[in-house]
Amino acid sequence: VDGILLRSTAPIWVPIIAFALLGEKINPKTYWGILIGFLGIVCVLHPRFVTLNIGYFLAVLSAIAYALSGILTRRLNQLGEPFLRTMFYAFLIPSIISIPYVLTHMGIHINLNTIALMCFIAIGTIMILLLFFSALQHGSAIVILPISYISVIFAGLFDWFFWQHVPNIAFII
């Protein structure tokens, strides 16, 4: 749940990154959304500095990358870049980047089950990217990315159902 929550902070990063990279002004009302978003994260995580680990850093880095992807994809769409080309590179680049990790952690122990799981993940990723990029053709990243917050709700429910981690009142708020 913590990883999904931190990855779901992408919409909070969108206006910050858009300001930093593209010079887009941030609506003063958006500052309140950013502040409330970060406070909500603190409520759910109820951080204790002894439990911070590299996973938290990677999840935040993933959120920033997701926000950046949304901003750049929208910008490419505005500039007339063909949808399928954008889709191809959005799938190819992360695949190439992940090769060293796969090789160092999977080694030569790849079996039929692993290949089937990797194919399932690849198909799921392609579907997510198709839907994500299609949505970005029709709307702003600032509007579309907050929909991803629903994943936090599902993660909390799965955490409760599968691992019996009952949500506390801060998580519910």
Image: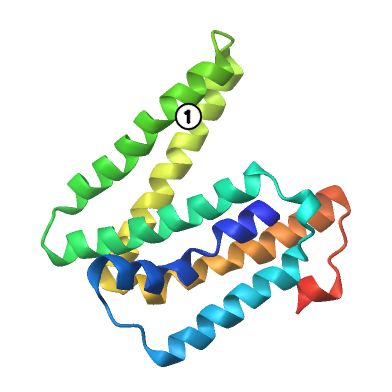
Quadrant in which the C terminus is drawn: bottom right
Does residue 9 sit above or below 118 in this rendering? below
Q: Amino acid at mark 1?
A: Cys
* Colouring style: rainbow
Q: Which x, y percent locates residue 118? A: 51, 28
Left or right of 36, for residue 170: right
The answer to which quarter of the image holds residue 141 is bottom left
Q: Which x, y percent locates residue 114? A: 57, 21
* Mark 1 crowdedness (10 Å alpha carbons): few <14, some 14-19, many ≥20: few
Q: Which x, y percent locates residue 95? A: 38, 32
Left or right of 42, for residue 168: right
Residue at 79%, 59% (x, y): give it: 48
Q: Secondary structure at mark 1?
A: helix
Query: Closer to the camera, 139 or 6?
Result: 6
Does residue 78 sit above or below 60 in this rendering? below
Residue denoted by label 1: 119
The answer to which quarter of the image holds residue 143 is bottom left
Left or right of 52, for residue 80: left
Residue at 44%, 22% (x, y): give it: 100
